[in-house]
């Protein structure tokens, strides 16, 4: 899986590819290979201004490497004629862009209003305990990172938990072990 | 219909008819269900004709503000001197709201069709669907539908042989509530921080890429195809004069049957909670409801006998907002709920305006202090003062949004605050 190229992507949806993947395909330079150039060109083709391809390209960097390094920001800036400082100012605004390397499975427990009412704090604690981590800290085996999330938009299915690209709903402290077990054999999550 | 539960209140199901049926995601099945008939009609109509039908239907924006959709479209220049754009706001992230995700998830082609009809009405050459980053599974469903629609000639050049061209691009955000504010969305889409800006200029004058732009919510656009095929009067058979049509209600919190339900506007709020959703779970009593998503004033158990319309909820002292009731049972610690809600706004403040950046965080800190036993009675006065400082003083209404639940909880559940302050930590 790791060396496999993603299938050909229609330009209309190139700016909407999942970028929180457990499987990563690290690369030093984003736009030195055909895939990177293809993504860049297709994204740019969808907007009247190059700058608008910034979020799609930040997402692409994270899709490949799992996080967005200062070097990646600089490379993206170069490709879109933006300064590294500007790229950084945008990247740091959005919580989903990882500015540091992360664990393979980013477990985000929604503890916002509706989930809070339905016992999300206990679910959050249960994930911390099961992974042996503190909030936002990578587990020793680098597999897990548990964080509190703001509203995930699944309020009727509290507690909602997002792990990378996947949603788990109606999670209880008792079902935390099942969620963790489901992650092992799922590369996408 | 509803999801994951159905309900007994007989209604026309416009949006939710195929919720729960994964086959409706496929173009072939969808067309067999009558899909894209509205678009076929639209390509034979001129822009003002389409706008007139939607105006007559009385459809109001479903993103929270309730602005009349046809009127919004009519603000776009009638004689373009360059490109126009449509942005579909799928950055659903108001705590309590999870209706747009059900549209993306079950009926993506309905949304695509609505986008194209709206684009024709406002003479837009390109539609950008801005989906919140977290919605990966639903974005994937939408992406597949968009590619199918392109391949079948419903999007792109010479749509349905009409000679009309319109592109559509799906664009995802990366975790910013404020990107759901229309000017914040536009700032984000063009490659910036999702910072709202002062209006005017309004998007219809200067929006994305400096061009005339309309921003519409997912649910608003999804209602358009059937309004076009069936007509404005048909749509008006549901709802009231000022709030016509049907509405998705996404109900959460301490309910027996939480979920998304399509109902005609005007059903009493208490019927939605007690009949449709089966009432409070575990046989407990209801304490309060935040009726329209976290940025609306909460109502007590005695205040729910109001019609679920824009005007009805306003008269009740709250707002329909995104129609997302969050229900709390009698055991709820009100201070903790409002504290967690305030933390949300503090986290999501974009930081441009001092009142909002500092004030939302102060509210969260003071509430946390009260909750953990360090509160003082004068904290209640400070919170009221903050309500004043956070209202109407900022670029966008994020700061105002925290005031509605906060002030209403202070007014209606002051005893909860005082008990914690006088009793110390629980």
Image (cartoon, coloured by chain):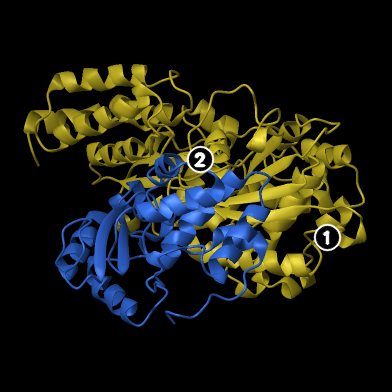
Q: Position of residue B392 (x, y in %)?
A: 45, 19
Colour given to chain B in the rendered image:
yellow
Q: Position of residue B70 (x, y in %)?
A: 75, 36
Q: Which residue is mark 1?
A: B37
Please tell me which residue is depicted at 40% across the width and 65% down the height of the picture: A28
Chain letter behind tag 2: B
Crowding near the residue tagged with mark 1, few <14, some 14–19, many ≥20 C-alpha atoms within 10 Å: some
Q: Please state if B383 lies on the left or on the right of B213 as rendered.
A: left
Shown in blue, the chain is A
Please tell me which residue is depicted at 42% across the width and 79% down the height of the picture: A2
Please tell me which residue is depicted at 67% across the width and 33% down the height of the picture: B210
Q: Position of residue B267 (x, y in %)?
A: 58, 44
Crowding near the residue tagged with mark 2, few <14, some 14–19, many ≥20 C-alpha atoms within 10 Å: many
Chain letter behind tag 1: B
Q: Is residue A23 shown above or below B132?
A: below
Q: Position of residue B185 (x, y in %)?
A: 55, 40
| Corner quadrant of residue B398 | top left
Q: Does the image show residue B42?
A: yes
């Amino acid at each position: 899986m790791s060396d496999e190229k993603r299938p050909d992507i229609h330009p209309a949806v190139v700016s909407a590819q999942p970028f929180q993947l457990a499987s990563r395909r690290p690369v030093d330079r984003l736009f030195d290979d055909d895939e990177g150039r293809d993504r860049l060109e297709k994204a740019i083709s969808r907007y009247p201004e190059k700058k608008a391809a910034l979020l799609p390209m930040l997402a692409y960097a994270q899709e490949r490497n799992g996080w967005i390094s200062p070097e990646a920001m600089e490379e993206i800036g170069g490709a879109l004629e933006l300064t590294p400082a500007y790229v950084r100012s945008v990247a740091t605004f959005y919580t989903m862009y990882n500015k540091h390397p992360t664990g393979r499975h980013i477990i985000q427990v929604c503890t916002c209003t509706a989930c809070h009412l339905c016992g999300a704090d206990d679910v959050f604690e249960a994930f911390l305990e099961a992974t042996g981590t503190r909030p936002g800290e990578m587990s020793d085996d680098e597999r897990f990172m548990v964080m509190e999330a703001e509203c995930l938009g699944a309020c009727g299915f509290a507690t909602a938990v997002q792990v990378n690209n996947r949603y788990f709903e109606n999670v209880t402290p008792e079902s935390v072990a099942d969620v963790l077990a489901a992650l092992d054999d799922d590369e996408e999550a | 219909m509803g999801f994951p539960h159905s309900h007994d209140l007989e209604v026309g199901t416009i949006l939710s008819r195929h919720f729960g049926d994964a086959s409706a995601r496929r173009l072939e099945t969808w067309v067999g269900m009558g899909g894209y008939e509205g678009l076929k009609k639209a390509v034979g109509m001129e822009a003002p004709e389409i706008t007139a039908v939607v105006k007559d239907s009385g459809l109001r924006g479903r993103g929270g503000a309730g602005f009349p959709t046809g009127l919004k479209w009519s603000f776009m220049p009638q004689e373009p001197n360059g490109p126009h754009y449509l942005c579909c706001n799928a950055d659903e992230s108001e705590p309590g709201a999870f209706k747009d995700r059900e549209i993306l998830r079950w009926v993506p082609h309905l949304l695509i069709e609505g986008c194209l009809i709206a684009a024709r009405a406002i003479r837009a050459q390109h539609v950008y669907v801005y989906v919140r980053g977290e919605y990966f599974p639903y974005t994937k469903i939408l992406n597949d539908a968009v590619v199918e629609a392109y391949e079948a000639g419903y999007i792109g050049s010479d749509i349905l042989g009409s000679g009309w061209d319109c592109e559509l691009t799906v664009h995802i955000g990366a975790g910013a509530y404020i990107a759901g504010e229309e000017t914040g969305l536009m700032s984000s889409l063009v490659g910036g921080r999702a910072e709202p800006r002062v209006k005017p200029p309004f998007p219809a004058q200067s929006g994305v890429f400096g061009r005339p732009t309309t921003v519409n919510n997912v649910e608003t656009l999804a209602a358009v195809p059937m309004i076009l095929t069936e007509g404005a009067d048909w749509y008006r058979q549901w709802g009231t004069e000022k709030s016509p049509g049907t509405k998705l209600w996404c109900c959460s919190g301490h309910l027996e049957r939480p979920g998304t339900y399509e109902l005609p506007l005007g059903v009493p709020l208490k019927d939605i909670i007690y009949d449709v959703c089966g009432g409070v779970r575990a046989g407990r009593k209801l304490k309060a409801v935040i009726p329209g998503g976290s940025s609306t004033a909460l109502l007590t158990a005695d205040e729910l006998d109001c019609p679920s319309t824009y005007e009805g909820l306003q008269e009740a002292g709250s707002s329909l907002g995104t129609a997302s009731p969050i229900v709390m049972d009698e055991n709820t610690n009100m201070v903790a709920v409002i504290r967690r809600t305030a933390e949300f706004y503090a986290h999501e403040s974009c930081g441009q305006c001092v009142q909002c950046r500092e004030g939302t965080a102060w509210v969260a800190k003071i509430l946390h202090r009260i909750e953990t036993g360090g509160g003082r009675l004068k904290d209640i006065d400070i919170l009221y003062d903050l309500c004043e400082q956070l209202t109407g003083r900022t670029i966008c209404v994020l700061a105002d949004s925290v005031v509605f639940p906060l002030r209403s909880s202070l007014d209606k559940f002051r005893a909860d605050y005082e008990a914690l302050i006088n009793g110390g930590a629980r």
